[in-house]
Image: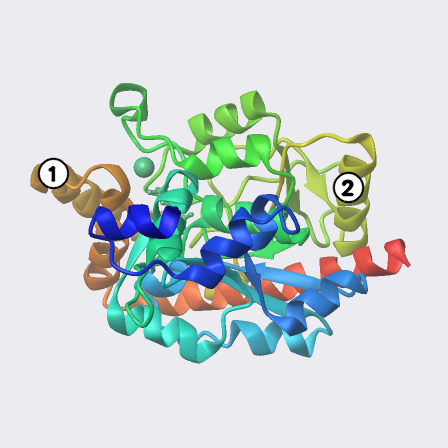
């Protein structure tokens, strides 16, 4: 009947295998819709270390696609799982050619609210005809990772409360996701163009565990929550974490307690790549002002600001951005390895 319905409504021929799989009781819930690559599925089943990676960083991140993140994860003994929506199919374990296809053919930016929208397109896609791609943000990627059973996710910068957010109410869905989805995210804090103090207030309300890596600092020394290109933000981190093993213990404790909210591990940018706050401030001010003047609001705001900052800093911010993402992903892999040891 659904097939007839779709014809009558002019959808063309429904992608029958996918639709049928989703209607059968044998594979209820998300499992029928989610495509997990065999390598990732095997690793998860065997409790091997796996690190989720986002696809928005490739489709909307203004960094290029040659970040070597997968090889970094592998070099540390874990399996990478790039998450995104490929032709309407939510996928965990996208291959590099699949990511290139998304970039080439264009992808929309997909956070929690967009997942079912895009996946419905996959259910109704005609044979041979393709549905849209979605580059998943931190929020979208956390959701897919959780569905697949992945506990650790490495990325660049978290979305946050935007400057003036108390009026515009532009608060990234990344923050509410951390309140409801138990995945550990490793990032370099959030960008200096956001309101960092309010972002931390909001994460506290959401019940997200926030801890900043304080390598080398004597026990009990307070550290700043990092501001992406800069190691300091002027805002103190609510907690610190010593090393990857302690981070893994926090993940395990959260799970054993049944607390469903997420964890945010902030990893300050490596010293040698950091750009002092004052140097970035002028570019940030300009980019934020232009975005407001030109009307880039909603989910178009962050990509516009990222692109403008890249232009205004003569690509210098890009080198720093790449270095910090790579450091975060390495750290995420080490945490996943420690966690796998504890679960043995
Ligand atoms: N920060 C970055 N690079 C990025 C993003 C943030 O330095 O690519 C992306 C991430 O995918 C993040 C999303 O989840 O932007 C947040 O977008 P918004 O502010 O619209 O919620
Ligand atoms: Mn927003």
Q: Give x and y (percent) for residue 92.
A: 55, 61
Q: Residue at x 47, y 43 (%)?
A: 139
Could you say which is closer to the camera, residue 192 or residue 184? 184
Tell me, yes or no, if residue 234 can be seen here: no
Separation (CA) of disc 1 from disc 2: 41 Å
Q: Kindly state the secondary structure of the residue where label 1 is placed.
A: loop
Q: Give x and y (percent) for residue 325.
A: 50, 63
Q: Kindly state the secondary structure of the residue where label 2 is placed.
A: helix
Quadrant location of the C terminus? Answer: bottom right
Residue 18, numbered label: none
- Reading the image, the residue beneath label 2 is 250
Q: Is residue 248 left or right of residue 2?
A: right
- Reading the image, the residue beneath label 1 is 295
Q: Give x and y (percent) for residue 85.
A: 42, 58
Among all residues in the image, which is located at the extreme right? Answer: 344
The answer to whether 312 is drawn above or below residue 234 in the figure is below
Q: Give x and y (percent) for residue 228.
A: 45, 51
Of the four image quadrants, the one with ligand 2 is: top left
| Mark 1–mark 2 CB contact (< 8 Å) | no
Q: Is residue 21 left or right of residue 104?
A: right
Q: Residue at x 53, y 72 (%)?
A: 69
For disc 2, the neighbor class at 10 Å (few under 14, some 14 to 19, many from 20) is some
The answer to whether mark 1 is within 8 Å of ligand 2 is no
Q: Residue at x 30, y 46 (%)?
A: 5
Quadrant of residue 288 in the image? top left
Could you say which is closer to the camera, residue 263 or residue 326? 263
Q: First in sequence, mark 1 or 2: give its number.
A: 2
Among all residues in the image, which is located at the extreme left? Answer: 294
């Amino acid at each position: 009947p659904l097939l007839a319905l779709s014809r009558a409504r002019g959808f063309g021929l429904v992608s029958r295998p996918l639709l049928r799989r989703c209607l059968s009781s044998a594979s209820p819930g998300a499992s029928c819709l989610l495509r997990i690559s065999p390598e990732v599925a095997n690793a998860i089943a065997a409790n091997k270390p796996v690190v989720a990676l986002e696809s928005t960083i490739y489709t909307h991140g203004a960094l290029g696609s040659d970040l070597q993140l997968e090889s970094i994860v592998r070099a540390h003994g874990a399996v990478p799982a790039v998450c995104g929506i490929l032709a309407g199919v939510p996928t965990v374990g996208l291959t590099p050619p699949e990511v290139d296809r998304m970039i080439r053919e264009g992808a929309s930016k997909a956070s929690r609210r967009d997942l079912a929208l895009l996946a419905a397109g996959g259910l109704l896609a005609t044979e041979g005809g393709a549905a849209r791609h979605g580059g998943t943000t931190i929020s979208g990627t956390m959701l897919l990772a959780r569905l697949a059973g992945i506990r650790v996710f490495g990325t660049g910068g978290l979305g946050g409360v935007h400057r003036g957010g108390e009026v515009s109410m532009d608060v990234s869905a990344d923050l509410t996701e951390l309140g409801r989805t138990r995945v550990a995210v490793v990032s370099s804090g959030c960008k200096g163009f956001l309101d960092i103090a309010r972002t931390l207030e909001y994460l506290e309300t959401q019940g997200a565990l926030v801890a900043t890596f304080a390598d080398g600092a004597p026990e009990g020394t307070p550290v700043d929550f990092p501001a992406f290109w800069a190691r300091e933000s002027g805002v103190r981190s609510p907690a610190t974490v010593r090393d990857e093993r302690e981070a893994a213990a926090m993940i395990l404790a959260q799970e054993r307690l049944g607390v469903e909210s997420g964890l945010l591990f902030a990893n300050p940018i490596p010293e040698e790549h950091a750009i002092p706050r004052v140097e970035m401030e002028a570019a940030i001010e300009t980019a934020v002002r232009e975005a407001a003047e030109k009307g880039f609001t909603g989910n178009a705001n962050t990509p516009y600001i990222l692109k403008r900052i890249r232009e205004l800093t003569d690509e210098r911010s890009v080198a720093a951005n790449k270095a910090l993402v790579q450091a975060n992903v390495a750290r995420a892999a080490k945490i996943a390895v420690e966690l796998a040891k504890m679960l043995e």
